[in-house]
């Protein structure tokens, strides 16, 4: 396997840029930071499928493609199905010796937004992981259906304003908690499951390489701040990601074989979630006196979850 | 000062996205295949942009320069080649070769300012200027090193 050196950023930067320019994501969009890192951390041939969403529409603007490798889009929900079909075919042809180059290493990757991963494509993802294909699924989690105007998804956290869970005189935004997709995918018994973030580029590249190298189905949820729907200045994408990881709103960790949990990043100074919320327009209403209880609830959820992660890491079960 | 003869394949930025030669949405063939490269592409992952044989379908041959209102300007004299800008640029617009930052790909940069934010030097080695500003003038206006606030 031709993984590239990620010892430090200087070494990493000597690798070829594989994700081509003039894609049409919003300026400052984290989706492409994540995809670039995935593609740049390997020299292997990739077969990639994308679900419908911002990434897909912005990298296949007819008559252009921004992919330097085999890439397919079929529908909103079926990237996991498409890419695992290709993986099964590749395996069969390899066995029969009918490939052009039988030894060329190929990795199979699917990208989906949170809408297609947590909600609409969930059964396709679950089925592909259960069948045990050798592929990596990466969710670009921006906590809303961004490409269609910012509707709430089951990845939207409690208290966030979205176009279908609006904050106003009678509502503080979304009332339900975020679905715990990492735990759900770990419960499938997948050999490698992780949550990673683009500000921590090294743990992200390491996690991507681990997933590509691991045989079997791997799942990675990546935090992908969306300046358009989270309502912050595009230049602040990495600053917001720092607030997300350092407030533990998005803890960085991996789960091996469904049980061995490792925390990959421990902030030196854990920030209050208020700092993270205050930096984004979608949480502005929470700072009204009548909504303060929602901030308290979010903080309580974070503290409890962090405690749980630490105990599970310690217990090794 | 600034070497702008950046590494590029001949074809970078020759197409305008959404140009008028496009067919209508109801004229596009379903199930279409676009080839990213001319000829054999089996080894392409090992090639740098200037070595890649781009086809006209590759978005590398297109430009999004018209999206910008402001542009980042690079001052090589202050740069420490940390590659922060390279890893976090969302538009593959930081050109680095042999561990050195060479400059900005203005055909693909959208002016998001992320590179300026993540640049650690003092003064910064990347700063935003009006799109119309010429590079010499921009560089002549570079700020001095800032004293640490107490
Ligand atoms: C079956 C189906 N339902 C709905 C849509 C419309 N649609 C296209 S993109 C999109 C939003 C995608 O959201 P997400 O998966 O979170 O990706 P993001 O755009 O946020 O990256 C929706 C609802 C569709 N194309 N197909
Ligand atoms: S709407 Fe959000 S996710 Fe979509 S391209 Fe813009 S910043 Fe990226
Ligand atoms: S302004 Fe944005 S797109 Fe342009 S080089 Fe900097 S980070 Fe890249
Ligand atoms: S972030 Fe600044 S110092 Fe680092 S390589 Fe880029 S321009 Fe140079
Ligand atoms: Mg989304």
Image: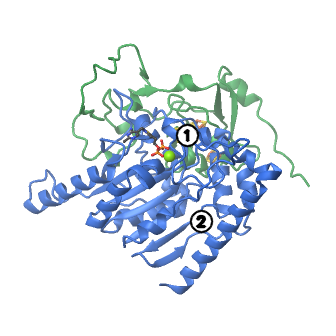
Q: Residue at x 53, y 36 (%)?
A: A149
Q: In this orientation, does residue A40 appear?
A: no
| Subunit bearing disc 2 | A
| Subunit bearing disc 1 | A
**Which is more N-terminal, label 2 or label 1?**
1
Foreground disc of the pair 1, 2: 1
Label 1 – label 2 distance at C-alpha: 24 Å
Which image quadrant: the N terminus of chain A?
Answer: bottom left
Q: Bin the neighbour count of mark 2 within 10 Å (Cα to Cα): few under 14, some 14-19, many 20 and up.
A: many
Q: Nearer the viewer, residue A277 or A94?
A: A277
Q: Is residue A142 above or below residue B18?
A: below
**Color of chain B here?**
green
Give left or right: position of A140 versus B57: right
Task: Describe the element under mark 2 as helix, strand or loop.
Answer: loop
Task: Describe the element under mark 1 as helix, strand or loop.
Answer: loop
Q: Residue at x 52, y 33 (%)?
A: B105
In the rendered image, residues at marks 1 and 2 fall on the same chain: yes
Residue bearing the label numbered 1: A150
Q: Residue at x 27, y 34 (%)?
A: B35
Q: Position of residue B36 (x, y in %)?
A: 30, 35
Q: Is residue A102 above or below residue B44?
A: below
**Color of chain A here?**
blue
Residue bearing the label numbered 2: A251
Choose top left, top right, bottom left or bottom right for residue B54: top left
Q: Bin the neighbour count of mark 1 within 10 Å (Cα to Cα): few under 14, some 14-19, many 20 and up.
A: many
Q: Position of residue A66 (x, y in %)?
A: 39, 37
In this view, the residue farthest toward the front is A170
């Amino acid at each position: 396997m031709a993984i590239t050196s990620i010892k430090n950023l200087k070494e990493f930067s000597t690798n070829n840029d594989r994700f081509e320019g003039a894609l049409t994501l919003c300026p400052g969009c984290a989706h492409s930071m994540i995809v670039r890192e995935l593609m740049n951390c390997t020299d292997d041939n990739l077969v990639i499928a994308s679900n419908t969403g911002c990434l897909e529409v912005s990298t296949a603007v007819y008559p252009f493609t921004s992919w330097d490798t085999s890439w397919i889009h079929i529908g909103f929900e079926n990237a996991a199905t498409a890419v695992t079909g290709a993986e099964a075919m590749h395996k069969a042809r390899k066995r029969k010796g009918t490939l052009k180059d039988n030894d060329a290493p190929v990795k199979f990757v699917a990208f989906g937004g949170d809408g297609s991963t947590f909600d609409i494509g969930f059964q396709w993802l679950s089925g592909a992981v259960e069948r045990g294909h050798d592929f990596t699924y990466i969710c670009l989690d921006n906590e809303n259906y961004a490409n269609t105007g910012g509707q709430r998804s089951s990845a939207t956290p409690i208290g966030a304003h979205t176009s279908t869970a609006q904050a106003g005189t009678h509502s503080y935004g979304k009332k339900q908690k975020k679905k715990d997709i990492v735990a759900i995918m770990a419960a499938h018994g997948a050999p490698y499951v992780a949550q990673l973030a683009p500000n921590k580029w090294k743990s992200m590249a390491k996690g991507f390489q681990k997933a590509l190298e691991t045989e079997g189905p791997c799942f990675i949820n990546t935090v992908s701040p969306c300046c358009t729907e989270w309502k912050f200045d595009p230049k602040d994408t990495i600053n917001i990601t720092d607030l997300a990881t350092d407030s533990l709103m998005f803890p960085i960790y991996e789960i091996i074989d469904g049980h061995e949990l490792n925390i990959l990043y421990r902030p030196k100074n854990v920030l209050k979630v208020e700092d993270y919320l205050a930096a984004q327009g979608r949480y502005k209403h929470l700072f009204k006196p009548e909504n303060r209880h929602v901030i308290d609830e979010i903080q309580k959820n974070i503290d409890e979850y962090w405690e749980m992660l630490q105990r599970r890491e310690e217990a090794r079960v | 000062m600034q070497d702008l003869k950046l590494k590029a394949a001949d074809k970078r930025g020759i197409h305008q996205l959404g140009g008028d030669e496009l067919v209508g949405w109801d004229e596009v063939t379903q199930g279409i295949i676009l080839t990213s490269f001319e000829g054999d592409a089996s080894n392409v992952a090992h090639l740098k942009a200037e070595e890649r044989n781009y086809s006209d379908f590759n978005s590398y041959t297109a430009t999004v320069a018209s999206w910008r209102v402001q542009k980042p300007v690079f001052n090589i004299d202050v740069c420490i080649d940390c590659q922060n800008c390279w890893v976090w640029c969302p538009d593959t617009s930081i050109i680095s070769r042999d561990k050195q930052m060479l400059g900005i790909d203005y055909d693909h940069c959208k002016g998001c300012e992320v590179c300026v934010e993540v640049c650690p030097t003092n003064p910064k080695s990347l700063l935003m200027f009006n799109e119309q500003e010429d590079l010499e003038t921009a560089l002549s206006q570079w700020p001095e090193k800032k004293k640490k606030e107490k």
